[in-house]
Amino acid sequence: MRQYLDFEKPVAELENKIAELRQVGQDGDGINIADEVAKLSEKADRQLRAAYAKLTAAQKVQVARHPQRPKTLDYFRELLTEYTPLAGDRLGHEDRAVVGGLARFRGTPVMVIGTERGFDMESRLNHNFGMARPEGYRKAQRLIQLAGRFGLPVLTFVDTAGAWPGIDAEERGQAEAIARSTDTVLRAPVPVIATIIGEGGSGGAVALAAGDRVFMLEHSVYSVISPEGAASILWRDPKQAPAAAEALKITAQDLLALKLIDRIIPEPVGGAQRLPQEVIAAVGDAIAAELPDLVGVDAPVLVMRRREKFLAMGRDGAA
C-alpha cells in the first residue's frame, strides 16, 4: 500500500477514490467507470506535478526520508551481478548498518559500500536504521583498502540520518572511526563514486561520500546536521525545523549551485518511491557515464585531484 506524505494528502484522496471506483468496476455488472477514472487520474497527476514543482527544503527532507524510497540493498540487487557480501571490521565487530562487498557493475569488477536503513521494523532494527557504529566505518575502511590493493573502483551509496550517537559508539571511538573513514576515501588509489540516494546526514555520510564524483538524487538531502537538530540548537524549538532546512541549504539543487556535488540525478514526479526501478536505472546510467573517465587515471593523479576538489570547496566557500 502506498504511503503518502503530509503535503500529498489531496493526491492521496484522489488516488484512493480512483482505487474505490476500480473496485466497483470489478464488482459491478457492466458499470463503465473508465471516463471518471481517467478524469480523476488526470487531476491527481496535475496535483502531484504541482506539489513537486514547488517543494520546500523541509518537504524535500520528507521525501528523502520516505519509508518506501528504494534502499541501498535495492540498488545492489538491481545494478550488480555476482555480489559477494563481506562482513566484519577484523577487530571483533560487525555492523549491519554498513553493507558492502565485491561485485560486478555492468561487467566491471567493483567494490560496493553503502548504508542500509531497512524496509520494515525487523530489518530497520537489524540495520540500526542505517546509523553506523565505529565498526561499520572500520569495515568500510577495510573494504576500500582491499579495493585499492586489487585496483577495483569503489561505488558508495549513502542513506543515513548520521552516525549512531549512542554511548557504546562513543566508547569505541566513533569520531576517530568517521575521520579515518573519510581519510581512507580521500586517499583511495582507485576511483570513488558516491551517490546520496536519500538522506546524507553529517559526518556519518561524509565518511563514505568524499569521492571523485558525488551524485545526489533530485529529492535527496545532504547536511552537516538534521533540520530538527539545528532548530533545537539555534532556537531550542524543533518546530523551527522548516526554517532550519531552508537556512542549511541541504537540497541537491542548493549543493550543486554551491559546487559541493557534481550531478543531480532526476527522479520521477512524486519521488523515487513511485518508480523505484526507473530511478535505480538512472543512477546506474550516471555511474556508467562517469566511471570510464576515472578508471584510466593513474593513482597519484586521482588522489591529487580528489584532494584539490575538496580543498577548493573550502577556498571557494571562504571567498
Image: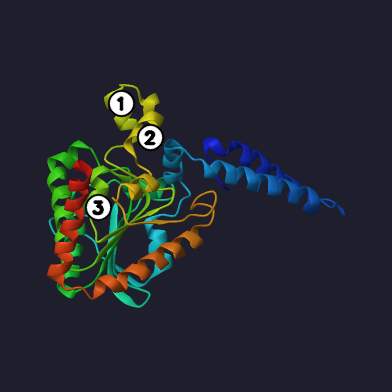
- Cα distance in 3D space between marks 3 and 2: 33 Å
Tell me the element at label 3.
loop
In the image: residue 196, left or right of residue 7: left
The answer to whether residue 173 is above or below residue 275 is above
Q: Which amino acid does label 3 sit on?
A: Asp
Q: Which of marks 3 and 2 is nearer the N terminus?
A: 3
82 lies left or right of 119 = left
Element on which disc 2 rests: helix
Q: Which residue lies furthest to the bottom in this view?
A: 107
Q: Which of marks 1 and 3 is nearer the N terminus?
A: 3
Q: Mark 2 points at which residue?
A: 246
Name the one closer to the observer, 261 or 153.
261
Q: Residue at x 50, y 50 (%)?
A: 271
Could you tell me which residue is drawn at 38 percent across and 29 percent down? Answer: 243
**In front here: 37 or 308?**
308
**Mark 1 against mark 3, which lies toward the viewer?**
1
Residue 296, image quadrant: bottom left
